């Protein structure tokens, strides 16, 4: 190898290292931290294989009882601390669902699309499963289902929808999409237009006064609208909607 080639290889390697390092640094700087009250809720949950598991009362996380007949795998929004969703998932557990919060590499679900498979395999006692997520998490949940995932009966989108190239309309699953009327990231018609890529009979639910960030306990996002209801109220309505969907799956 000539000296010129060796120098070029070293420079190329240095550029790659710099780009990777810069990307990693950006994800840490741009990350949305969970509010302390959300972290406190997460502390009462179980930790199983790196997941934060919210089990219904009387159903330990590692051994879900017959009462936890439905499970929900949740993918967090992009660059959002997963624990920001602890209050919402605790509401689902209080309603009888086994809710599993799945952290993602660099807080970007695009790097962990297949992680739901391990969750489903870890809880064989749960007979019915749904997968879903917020924002990017919901879009990547759709990619998981699109890839031919087995054992998934439903999918839930929170301020999210499948990518334009992702058509789930012929899959034998049920789907729910819910969003806040003040979502500044996507106009309401964007969610409505995406319904053609979901199975027939899928439900679209608008939360009046909610915004994009209100599904989690973290700070405001650039471009988002201003919510006209409290964060807790948005999450209460979201939890009720999701729980109704999960019960119908059973």
Image (cartoon, rainbow, N blue to C red):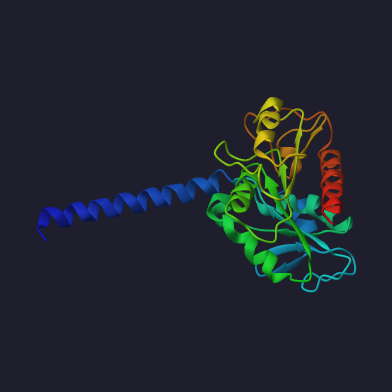
Q: Identify the residue at the far left of this view.
A: 2
Q: Residue at x 84, y 64 (%)?
A: 69
The quarter in which the C terminus is drawn is bottom right
The answer to which of 34 and 86 lies nearer the viewer is: 86
Q: Is residue 105 left or right of residue 75?
A: left
Residue 166 sits in quarter: top right
The answer to which of 108 and 245 lies nearer the viewer is: 245
Q: Is residue 234 left or right of residue 213?
A: right
Q: Residue at x 75, y 35 (%)?
A: 179
Q: Identify the residue at the far bottom of this view.
A: 63
Residue 209 sits in quarter: top right
Q: Residue at x 55, y 50 (%)?
A: 110
Whole-percent x and y of residue 14?
29, 53
Whole-percent x and y of residue 213?
71, 38
The answer to which of 28 and 56 lies nearer the viewer is: 56
The answer to which of 133 and 10 lies nearer the viewer is: 133
Q: Is residue 184 above or below residue 75?
A: above
Whole-percent x and y of residue 141?
64, 50
Q: Is residue 191 above or below residue 26?
A: above
Residue 149 appearing in the image? yes
Residue 108 appearing in the image? no
Whole-percent x and y of residue 249?
82, 53
Q: Is residue 244 left or right of residue 62?
A: right
Q: Is residue 136 left or right of residue 16?
A: right
Residue 128 sits in quarter: bottom right
The quarter in which the N terminus is drawn is bottom left
């Amino acid at each position: 190898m000539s000296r010129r080639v060796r120098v070029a290889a070293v420079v190329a390697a240095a550029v790659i290292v710099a780009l990777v390092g810069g990307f990693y640094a950006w994800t840490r700087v741009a990350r949305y931290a969970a509010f302390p009250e959300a972290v406190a809720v997460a502390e009462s949950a179980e930790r199983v294989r790196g997941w934060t598991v919210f089990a219904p009362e009387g159903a330990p996380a590692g051994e879900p009882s017959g009462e936890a007949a439905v499970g929900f795998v949740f993918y967090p929004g992009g660059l959002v601390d997963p624990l920001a969703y602890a209050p919402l998932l605790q509401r689902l557990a209080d309603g009888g669902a086994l809710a599993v919060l799945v952290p993602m590499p660099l807080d970007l679900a695009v790097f962990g699309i297949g992680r739901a498979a391990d969750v489903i395999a870890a809880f064989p006692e749960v007979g019915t499963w749904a997968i879903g997520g917020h924002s990017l998490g919901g879009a990547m949940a759709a990619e998981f289902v699109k890839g031919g995932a087995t054992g998934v009966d439903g999918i839930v989108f929170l301020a999210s929808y499948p990518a334009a190239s992702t058509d789930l309309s012929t899959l034998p699953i049920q789907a729910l999409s819910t969003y806040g009327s003040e979502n500044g990231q996507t106009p309401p018609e964007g969610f409505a237009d995406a319904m053609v890529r979901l199975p027939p009979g899928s439900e679209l639910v608008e939360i009046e006064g909610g915004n994009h960030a209100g599904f989690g306990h973290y700070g405001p996002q650039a471009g988002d609208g201003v919510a006209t209801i409290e964060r807790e109220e948005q999450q209460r309505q979201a939890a009720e909607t999701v729980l109704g969907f999960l019960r119908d799956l059973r």
